[in-house]
Amino acid sequence: MPGDTAMNATVPGFAARVVVRRSGRSSAMFRFIRRNPEIAWGGFLLLVVAFLAVAAPLLGTVDPRAISTADRLKPPSAEHWFGTDMLGRDLYSRVLYGGRISLSIGVSAAALSAFLGSVIGLLAAFGAFMDAVVMRIMDGIMSIPAILLSIALMAVAGPSVENIILAITIVEAPRVARLIRGVVLSLRSQPYVDAAIAAGSSMPRIVVRHLLPGIVGPLTVQATFVWAMAMILEAALSFIGAGTPPSTPSWGNIMSDGKALWQVKPFLIFIPAGFLSVTLLAVNLLGDGLRDLLDPRLSKRI
Amino acid sequence: MLIYAIRRILLAIPVMGVVALVVFGLLYITPGDPALVIAGDQATPEQIARIHVSLGLDQPPYIRFGTWIGQVLRGDLGTSISSNQTVAHMIDQRLEPTITLLLLAVLLSVAVGVPFGVAAAWKKGKTADRALSVFTTAGFSIPVFVAGYALAFLFASTLHWLPVQGYAPLSEGLWPCLRSLILPAVTLSLVYAAVIGRVTRAAMLEVLGQDYIRTARAKGVGPVAVLFRHALKNAAVPVVTIIGIGIATLFGATVVTESVFAIPGLGRLTVDAILHRDYPVIQGMVLLSSAIYVLINLAVDLLYTVVDPRISY
């Protein structure tokens, strides 16, 4: 408001109060960081990686697909910070642009799995028939090792970024569904839900007002872990040749390109692997921290 | 006990049925001609026609599914597109390296994970506990194949202690075979041992807080006997469960590990099948892996009564 500055200047007590409030807020932030170092570290590392991926064009990269036969397999140098691969493509640019693909596959698969899993979990928790049928199907899907099911899915669907996201979602959504079903079943037997039913609340209202708030915590935590799983799956799939198409650089894909020559040029594998592992560490730290913060009842992840 | 076992086996049937339906249905929910999906892009019209006949595409889906299930139950997993051998035969040929690798990895993980978890629970918050925590976080952040390359780079390429890649079959002697499997087995064990360690730690912490442990300590039983004879026995159920679940996960992880270390096992078979778009082989591998998962879970459930006599069915 326009009058505020004038008031601050003329009324000393008011200005002092504003200052106290501001320092209170920043000390609250410091307290949060101090009490949740995992969230702070994970978030910080993720921001750095995300910045590198998003700002890739501004960070001295060249076209990650540009082939230059004269510059094949150059070691890291001033011109090519991470060296070049067997087609003479600049590894630094490929790793930064590859981060865009790897990160967005992770985030999209996590978001889709969280959504689909919650819908299935809620439906299963509310109908005995749905529960029996749907959860049997989920059990069946979960009995196939994640990597093999996604290989089978990719084999019929063909390599593309969209198909990887869908394949990972099909693999991971049942795990989310089982968690949400469990949470909803335990919430539903809470006295306050009985009270809401007795008070005549409608079913949609009970779901939105009384059950969803209880789901948000565990779901957020689970979604972070799905995010990490999705990035590992993408890398593994691309690594064995069932993932992103060869023209699209992703961290798994870059490692797959480098695997033939890894003994002579180890940096072709270890540089993208380092980026992947730091990102996974960040996501896992964030997940651990969020779990301690949002879901203290859950024990430490095994 | 017997009745329980039968009930558990009956309960496993719908799960396997869903798996069969998923594996079978995958080919048909995708748009386009399933024969074309199987044959790949370079297929000739004759090849496609042949696949059409072999799939029985002129018949309705439920009849095809019935025929297929009948074949699978008799152990006939179909014929590979790329090699014209039966899938069952191909799997049989590749079984030895994968099974030896899995056994070694499980032994290693249990031998490292359980004592690690016990030590972490015993000295909670001290060095062993912190080390386990770091170990777990690292295990979850380093994908299997990255760990494999790092180990191969250090112990094979640089130090030349162990062979870089390849597999020596058991028929060439136990030691050459073990030597070729040490690095892949350690690679597979990293995450698995960490998970076993965490579960052991959690289960032990619960048990160590109980009265009878204090009684045992008070009457002068030494720490090793208390930890392993009194406490670990009662913490065994979750540990056995996670070891069982882990074997199935390990089976999936062999796909990538065998590819890193060039081991001619089931994982390698799967990766080759992807490159050749050999769907029947992938189908067979998915069925096999989920059958293993279901069987191991069954075995674990039945083991509970042995591990913990208080449980009876």
Image: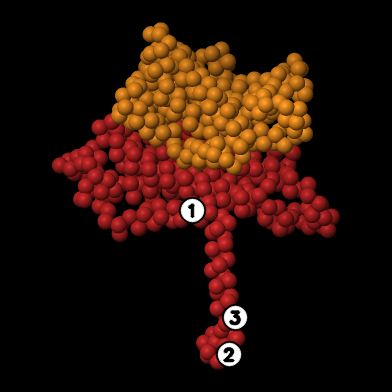
- Pick the quarter of the image with the C terminus of chain B: top right
Residue at image mark 3: A17
**Residue identifier under label 1:** A41
Residue located 53% across and 51% down the image: A38
Q: Foreground residue, A265 or B92? A: A265
Residue B262 x %, y %: 36, 23
- Determine the CA span between mark 3 and mark 2: 10 Å
Kindly indicate the quadrant of the structure image that contains residue B116: top right
Q: Helix, strand or loop at disc 2?
A: loop
Instruction: Identify whether A250 is placed above or below B94.
Output: below
**Can residue A241 be spotted in the picture?**
no
Q: Confirm or deny contact between disc 3 and disc 2 (CB under 8 A).
A: no
Amino acid under label 2?
Val
Question: What colour denotes chain A?
Answer: red
Q: Amino acid at mark 3?
A: Arg
Residue B231 x/y as whole percent? 69, 28
Q: Residues within 10 Å of mark 1 (few under 14, many from 20)?
A: some
Give the residue type at disc 1.
Answer: Trp
Chain label for disc 3? A
Say whether residue B245 is left or right of residue A73: right
For residue A14, above or below residue B244: below
